[in-house]
Image (cartoon, rainbow, N blue to C red):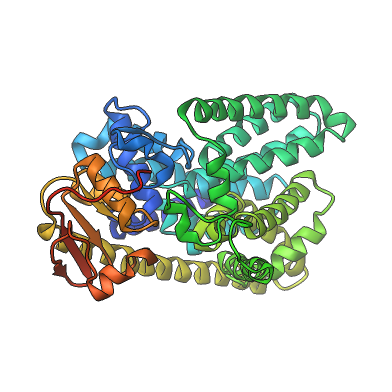
Amino acid sequence: MSWRLGAVCVAVFVARIASAVVVSQPGYTDAYYFTDVAERLARGGGLSADFVWSPIEANAFVLPVTSHLFWVPLPTVLASIGIALLGAVVGDFRAAQAAVVLVALAIPAITYVAARSYGVAEPFALAAAAIAGFGGAFAPGFVAVDAFAPAAVLGTGFFVAIRSAAAGSVRGGVLAGVLTGLLYLSRSEGALFGLALLALLGVPRARRAAIAACAVALAIGLTWLLRDLTAGAGSDVVARSALLVRYEDFFAFHPAYLGATDTALSDVIGVRLAALGTNAVTFAFAYVVVLIPMLVIGLLAARDRAAVRAWLGLTIVIYLVQSLIFTLHSTRGSYFHSLAALFPFGVAIASMGAERVLRSRPPANGLAWLWGAVVIVVAVSGAAVSQWDTTFNGGAQARLAALDAVPPGPFLAIDAAAWRWLSGRVVVVTPADGLVLAGCAAQRVGARSVVLEAAHFSRYDALYTRDERPSWLDAPLVRGTTKIYPISGTPACESAP
């Protein structure tokens, strides 16, 4: 490793630590969930949860429930390793975060390797390493207890490995298969990377490598799928991911699916067209807009390279699958999560394009553009971390300020994973079906209150805005925009989930 790359890695590490100072708690549902379960896993509790974040994992409300019937396990496993090693020293969240930060340290180096493997000159490869390392919009994600950093490293490694597999290396094929399997364990859409392996079956010299890659990837993927099936995950998970009419029905025991309501076909088509537009903007924002012209030039210049074709094909497929099938989830962060696995290699391709455009210009002009792009990405990274602070640290503080009004014992809330982490108590999601099933859930776990925030499911509007309470709920205790309704007596349960 050249000293220049070492300097870039050190600068990125300093930025990562600064970001981690701001990202001082999990922040949002996914990260809270991974951290909650990682604590249990690190202390021998296995993949289980002592809270219920969604009806998918309710299991008749007998706690603990089997976890990860919707999400995949690698972020939790990684965080649990950090907690097992460092939790007693720095606290569980910081320990989990430290494991993620260590993985994220590899992002600039592997981006540099990817660019150099295609003959990109060192200054352009270093700029790519810096851009991918600082992360831009991904900066807070690279220090979050989530899949952003693992997916970025695994995805970039995949595109490096598939280049070797396309040349006929069975070892490269095995590595590509392992990375595909691990990507699937990081994010469910990682399974789509297997399409690139299948495409190699049509290349005679790469066929043995492709068979080896597919076999390894299938072995990993089917092992997790078998676990899901034996743990009770069924077709409802797929339906809740792809066929919902309203996003909040993901948290309902009796959701409304497409075709089961009078939803107009024009509405179904309209929301998907809107998602195509929203996700296109997300893609542009991820690449800080200024990189996109160079990315296009790089794609055109290297379109005959197997890894570049694989990147382009997967970028298109993931965009379409997320927008047209997993529509409601995609525009609420799922598509942005997906881009993490594609981002560093996309930056490497952009560095190819930049070199092609700028190599005929005076060297000073080329370097000015390169490092100007780096400065822009650093600024966007800082803005993204600041936005994270405003959005998620402020939300956590508001919830902590309301905890003193929540009666002792289990309770119901919209974001059970977050409230579980902040309170250390048993928390069950307020079912999106409304108060009838909320009463059943409260009965099953012995909940003593229902907590409603300004963001709540629509079936609770009458309770939150007009105080239309059933007999088993007392008048609310108010903390800012949070209302805590103590439960008196036995909640009604007319329709058990």
Which residue sits furthest front?
494
Between residue 464 and residue 278, name the one nearer to us: 464
**Residue 300 in picture, x, y percent from top left:** 81, 61
Q: Quadrant of residue 475?
A: bottom left
**Residue 404 in picture, x, y percent from top left:** 10, 58
Left or right: 231 as drawn, with respect to 398: right
Between residue 172 and residue 33, name the one nearer to us: 33
Which residue sits furthest right?
204
User: Does residue 144 show up?
Assistant: no
User: Does residue 157 show up?
Assistant: yes
Q: Residue at x 25, y 52 (%)?
A: 412
Between residue 429 and residue 367, name the one nearer to us: 429
Left or right: 230 as drawn, with respect to 440: right
Q: Quadrant of residue 468?
A: bottom left
Left or right: 295 as drawn, with respect to 69: right
| Quadrant of the image containing the N terminus | top right
Q: Residue at x 29, y 25 (%)?
A: 44
**Residue 311 in picture, x, y percent from top left:** 71, 50
Q: Is residue 232 above or below residue 343?
A: above
**Exactly how many numbered labels are in the figure?**
0
Q: Quadrant of residue 294?
A: bottom right
Q: Is residue 116 above or below residue 139?
A: above
Q: Is residue 226 above or below residue 440?
A: above
| Quadrant of the image containing the C terminus | top left
